Amino acid sequence: MNNLMKFSLIALSFFGVILISASANAVELADEDVIAMTQQLEQRPLAPEADDLRQQLYEWTTDSDEVQISVCDVLGPIPSHEEIPYAKELLVQSFFGNAAYQLQHPASKNDQLKLQLAGITSMLKAYRNIIKQQPEARIATYDAWLKALDSDKLARQLLPTIAQKCLSDDPQQNQFAVLR
């Protein structure tokens, strides 16, 4: 089984728990609502309404023609077979950050570096707020990425990984899938 297929199956297994109640009707959200809901999940990822927001955003991202989420294996320890605290929430937050960025910057829809960084940045914002409430949920890789983000070095640090896993012409290296 190639790396893309393994990554896709692992990623889809993460969604199983989140998407159990997926409705048959398409969720219609205004661009501003998608952006606001994404920001709300960054700020309050453990709020009582967070799971409902995630469900709506996930359904919207998979049904929407306005955005196309490229899933690359660039999130460090996620997805994994290991038990990682809040892995499902962080994984989908990266999708939502990517989608919100596309809505805010339509001219950048084909710039995988910017899109992946937007997704990772959104995920890290949510992670920062998770560990404020749940310090035992720390993930060493993300702690290091937060330091890089705070010092404006995250893009430089992750560029080689994003280039290798999202932009490579080698199908074995390019772990690129489209979320639809």
Image (cartoon, rainbow, N blue to C red):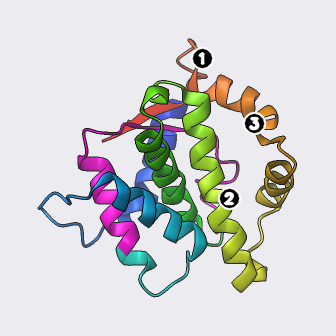
Q: Where 2 sits versus 20, above or below?
A: above
Q: Is residue 80 shown to the viewer in this render?
A: no
Label 3 to label 1, Cα distance in Å?
A: 18 Å
The region drawn magenta spans 53-82
Q: Is residue 54 magenta?
A: yes
Label 3 with label 2: CB-CB less than 8 Å: no
- Cβ–Cβ under 8 Å for marks 1 and 2: no
Q: Secondary structure at mark 2?
A: helix
Q: Earlier in the sequence, mark 3 or mark 2?
A: 2
Q: Earlier in the sequence, mark 1 or mark 2?
A: 2
In front of the other: 81 or 155: 155
Question: Local crowd at mark 1 within 10 Å, few (<14), some, or many (≥20)?
Answer: some
Query: Which residue is drawn at the image coordinates 36% and 64% (left, top)?
Result: 16
Total labels: the figure holds 3
Callout 3, which amino acid? Ala
Q: Residue at x 86, y 55 (%)?
A: 147
Which is more N-terminal, label 1 or label 3?
3
Between 70 and 38, the residue placed more toward the observer is 38
Residue 108 drawn at (x, y percent): 49, 28
Checking the image for residue 124, the label placed there is: 2
Three-letter amino acid code at the position of disc 2: Leu
Q: Residue at x 63, y 49 (%)?
A: 120
Relative vertical location of residue 114 with respect to residue 30 in this rendering, above or below: above
State the residue position of label 1.
Answer: 168
Q: Dot 3, crowdedness within 10 Å: few (<14), some or many (≥20)? A: some
Task: Please state if 110 lies on the left or on the right of 68 as rendered.
Answer: right
Residue 155, numbered circle: 3
